[in-house]
Amino acid sequence: MNRSNTKIYRNKKKWKDFPKWPQYGQRESRALLRALNSGVWGIGGKETEKFEKTFAEYQHCKYCVTMANGSVTLRNALLACNIEAGSEVIVPPYTFLATATSVIEANCIPVFVDIDPDTYCIDYRKIEKAVTPRTKAIIPVHLGGHAAAMDKIMEIAGKYNLYVIEDCAHAHGAEYKGKRVGSIGDIGSFSFQSSKNLCCGEGGAIVSNNKELTEKCWSIHNCGRIRDGAWYQHENLGSNYRLSQFQAAILNEQIKKIDRQIDKRQKNAAYLDEKLSQIPGIRPLIRKKEATRHTYHLYLFRYDTEIFSGIPRDIFTKSLRNKGIPVFEGYNTLIYKQPFMQGKRFATFNEWKHTNPNLNYSNTFCPVAENSAETEGCWLPQNILLGDKKNMDDIADAISRVHDNKKRLRSKIRH
Ligand SMILES: Cc1ncc(COP(=O)(O)O)c(C=O)c1O
């Protein structure tokens, strides 16, 4: 397993003058005080109610339920769809682990389908082959803020009667053919964890246009209660996955900035696409025309080791970081290759495996995702795209310099 990212994130390296994240000021301070002085810090507060209304509208949905994070939102969405234990749920392998572990936590089986080499989103052309009579749902991820091929995914879901839960953790405000993500499938799941484009430290939400599914999510996140029920009336199996008023207060301020930030990221990304495409061995991911609004939670590009004289990707990214450019390898170990998926670590997984004795991921092979994870994929985090033109030029210049000095760098690598 490649451990280089661990070191990187702990590294307190001085980056060039790129914008920091999160961005906040007096408004957030006042919002926190407002929540504090309301005297209602948890259930029944006005901040969550206000944010749920605002965020539902923002995502072109009728309903929103805030939750503790964007992992439980996925799990609770699956539970709300009443997907029975042992069912299969199709997921991409090039994503944060929660996309797949939420399936395991819902007592179901993640089935990995490879990604599209142009967008790194799930490859819709490969989904149908993975559908079996046990398949009950698909979780497409709008990776990096680029919408997955939702028309095709919805068509397949319609044909086989599958639920679609959109993992929108990277894609607040993103659009597919003008429709906001999260409003296309049955449920959209969002994360507000610190690095996300809309954040409050930790947090999450589901959005939906389906009242029944929303009410189930609401019940599951609030100890199985129902909206008009008594306090100790637990109609369903649920737990406490609620968001606090403090977190919602921050979100109520952060959401006012999001459109301006998206515009800026899109503009800088287009400029960077143009600049990086001119460097041999660097290919930015393709923005499909259907992805009418791309939120660039990540700016992804593909690195070609061969064209860089055989310099491995980790040396390439390290050399950029040494120049003050925060380029990372991102998901460098696919979910199905993680130790816990091989049954080596966690008891819970082994217990889950007892109920699914034939489960074995050792033969799972998604070649495109493996290439992205292990050799090709490079990331710039979203806050970098909030910089100015000079910041973008610095990135392109640093990559060009590595390219121009590739032979010298190669000769320095110990064999
Ligand atoms: C694609 C994706 N899905 C789900 C999650 C889980 O969100 P959270 O960290 O809020 O639990 C993340 C978080 O990084 C993510 O990137």
Image (tube, rainbow, N blue to C red):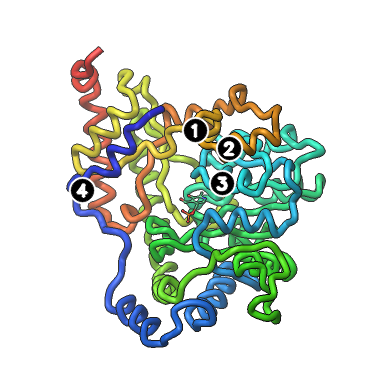
**In the depicted view, which residue is nearer to us: 124 or 135?**
135
Could you classify mark 4 by the number of other residues whose Cα lies within 10 Å: few (under 14), some (14-19), or many (20 or more)? some
Query: As shown in the figure, which amino acid type bears the numbered disc 1?
Result: Arg
Residue wearing tag 4? 15
Could you classify mark 3 by the number of other residues whose Cα lies within 10 Å: few (under 14), some (14-19), or many (20 or more)? many
Number of marks present in the image shown: 4
Tell me: 20 left or right of 364. Answer: left
- Above or below residue 408? Residue 377 is below
Quadrant in which the C terminus is drawn: top left
Tell me: 218 left or right of 272. Answer: right
Residue wearing tag 1? 345
| Whether the residue under disc 2 has CB within 8 Å of ligand 1 | no
Query: In the image, which is nearer the foreground, mark 3 or mark 2?
Result: 2
- Above or below residue 31? Residue 19 is above
Q: Residue at position x 24%, y 54% from top?
A: 18
Q: Mark 1 or 3 closer to N-term? A: 3
Q: Residue at position x 43%, y 64% from top?
A: 198
Q: CA distance from mark 3 to mark 2?
A: 15 Å
Callouts 4 and 1 close, C-beta under 8 Å: no
Quadrant in which the N terminus is drawn: top left
Q: Position of residue 180 (x, y in %)?
A: 59, 62
Residue wearing tag 3? 99
Residue 277 visible in image = no
Query: In the image, which is nearer the foreground, mark 1 or mark 3?
Result: 1
| Whether the residue under disc 3 has CB within 8 Å of ligand 1 | yes
Q: Residue at position x 48%, y 77% from top?
A: 42
Query: As shown in the figure, which amino acid type bears the numbered disc 3?
Result: Thr
Q: CA distance from mark 1 to mark 2?
A: 8 Å
